[in-house]
Image (cartoon, rainbow, N blue to C red):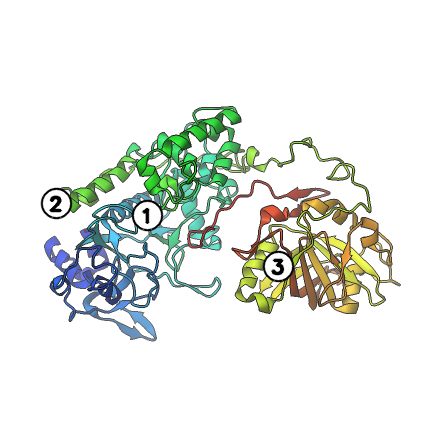
Amino acid sequence: ADYELLRQDFPELYSLDNAKIDQWLLNNTAYLSEGQIERLSKGGDHADKLGMKDGDLDDYIDKNDKTSAIRIRSGGRAATFFAGKTYRFIKNQLVAKMIDVKGVGTHKLADISHPKVTGLLNLADALREIMIQRLIQRLIELEGLEHKVNTVKFYGIVDTGLQYKGKNPATGWENERCVLTLRQRNSRILDGYEGFNFSGVCPEQVIKTGPGRELRRLLVKYGVSAEFFPRALLYNTEDTDGVAMASNATTGILDDLAGTWNLQSDATGANMMDFTDYYVLPKAPLPPQWRMSEKALSDALCLERTPFVKIAMSSPALMKRVYGGKSDKKEAEQWYSERLAALSKDPKMKEAAIKINKETGKIEPFKPKFCMCWFMELDDSKMSIWAMKTAKDFEKSGESKIDILAHIDDSLPVSRVSNPPLQTFPTRGKEVLPAFLSAPILPDSQSALVPENVYHSGWEPKTKQKCPYGNKFLSMTPAEIGRGTYKLLISCIVPRPIALVSTVSAKGVRNLAPYSYFGAMNHNPPTVCFSPCRNRNGNEKDGFDKDTLRNIKETGEFVLHIMSKWFVDVANFSCGSFLPGEDEFELSGATPIPSTKVKAPRVEEAAIQLECKLAALHEIKDDDGLVKATMVIGNILVFHINEGVYDKNTQTVDAAKLQPISRMGGNTYGQTAGMFDLPRPDRKVN
């Protein structure tokens, strides 16, 4: 136990010696949940796994001794106990001395159908989590960041006496000892994004700013990651995997969340917790015992998911580093293939892999069976090996021969890494997106320069550009989609899209025009907004409304489409300064098809077509009161999604197939490049 921390947090322990504090901890924390006791009882799913025989449970558990705790009804394994079994309310506020305990077992009503939901905690994972927590806390203190971000600290470990007889279904390891970890009080009940959330995994908005951002700045500086793919490998230098930034730097890797950080925190977002998913890169500016080897990094990037391998291959420096020192991409791909074949013959690797190709016997690139990524699975740092060995030794002897916390603390860094000096602009390659990631991806048959007037060579006005996925659509109302409307909408309205809006006047004249002041505003009801600016060619007699706005004022309806690369020339041509009454469908070559709820036609070439009803208009005026633009707010009545871009498994739009086009500055358009699948840890990968 960390007796100094315990005395600090619980003043009543100040005068007690360590042995008496041990007893105090056991009296207050050595409990299992009722749900877990059912699982250990005769007929329970864990009785045989832990070698429980008739009568053992009665000797092991005092069923008359119960304690008070805060417990979230989920598949988790933690509960917050009230020290002294007492609590009270003062002015509706809960007041108590608390200890959070991990490994107490699952709730009686938890879903335990998945074999990995054991409710128990093994000693090796507990040691790994404590050593990483103490490392992160030391780095926070060395950098003087305690006022910005902290960790939930551990009080100690309690041996439950339980031990698997054979394989632990949660980890795949043999004969593991089960323990409780004791840590400071915390709350994971987050209220704010899509209702209550009972998981500590930080959503993107929590780690983009504030404490989460400060922690990521710290971690990348010291070459520490909790990502599915460590993006620091794309920003580092030849000498170090740490990306140290000037203290005023705000861009680049700090805004790059594509690696998907598995950071967990309490409800405040300021106290980080659960550190089992962290690892340290080979060239991190930390003591060598914390770093994984270059071989482990290379093997991980041979076994990892194909999109990760493509990223590594796209970086010349990283490709050479991890794929046999090869500078030629074809040679690197050949080396990768041969190394994957060799790894597929290793029984340990095959045991850890989720998928094995039955025909070739090769491991199929994917995440490992028991970890979130292969970087964790293959972590061969001395500290990781120490945690495993210490756990194995304890499993055999039932006692620890070393002071665990002292060993960890002796291995911690004692000095900080200095930051670069203040600078006005970030250094290219470290704090901005690397050139090889930002370069446009064009078909091999095209030159690096897009033709001056059109994207597709030879295209002329009125020439149709067909959607490659045919013309079959899934037509769904928001009521039919239900709660899935949110994820469907945000997969439709992808980063910086362009609204291609079709309308029809009261007299039946069609209009089509693109708008870049556009975004999704809500998902229940599904709401979009775009803003036509003042018509510079208008006059006092005819008014200054563009045709789109005038038509919407007359009919209260419109259809909004997402622009895709295959018909960008058609869509772009529709933004010309045509006279009122001219039909942009006819002029550009766009194909009109009937809508189901509104009179305005849809554009057949567009893979996403959203029929909308006007909800509100908001005029944007300048200081003189002149209307400069009008925000058009509409509710989506029907989603029309081309079957070719719709993923039925996830019920979302596949952005890679949609090929959305974005609006940049001036006359420049952008295209989404370098996409890859990278789901969150709490979502199923299909």
Q: Which residue is mark 1?
A: 276
Q: CA distance from mark 3 to mark 1?
A: 36 Å
Of 647 and 289, which appears nearest the observer?
647
Q: Residues within 10 Å of mark 3 (few under 14, many from 20)?
A: some
22 left or right of 634?
A: left
Residue 538 percent coordinates (x, y): 85, 57
Q: CA distance from mark 2 to mark 3?
A: 61 Å
Q: Which residue is mark 3?
A: 520
Identity, as a three-letter code, of the amino acid under mark 1: Thr
Q: Callout 3: helix, strand or loop? A: strand
Residue 356, can we see it? yes
Identify the mark nearer the N-term, 2 or 3: 2
Residue 129 percent coordinates (x, y): 29, 48
State which mark lies toward you, 1 or 2: 2
Q: Which residue is mark 2?
A: 397
Hey, which residue is sitting farthest front in the picture?
359
State which mark lies toward you, 2 or 3: 2
540 left or right of 373?
A: right
Q: Check whether the beta carbons of the residues at disc 2 and disc 3 lie within 8 A of each other.
A: no
Residue 267 image-quadrant placement: bottom left
Q: CA distance from mark 1 to mark 2?
A: 25 Å
Identified at 72% across, 43% down, the residue is 666
Identified at 80% across, 49% down, the residue is 589
Identified at 44% across, 53% down, the residue is 684
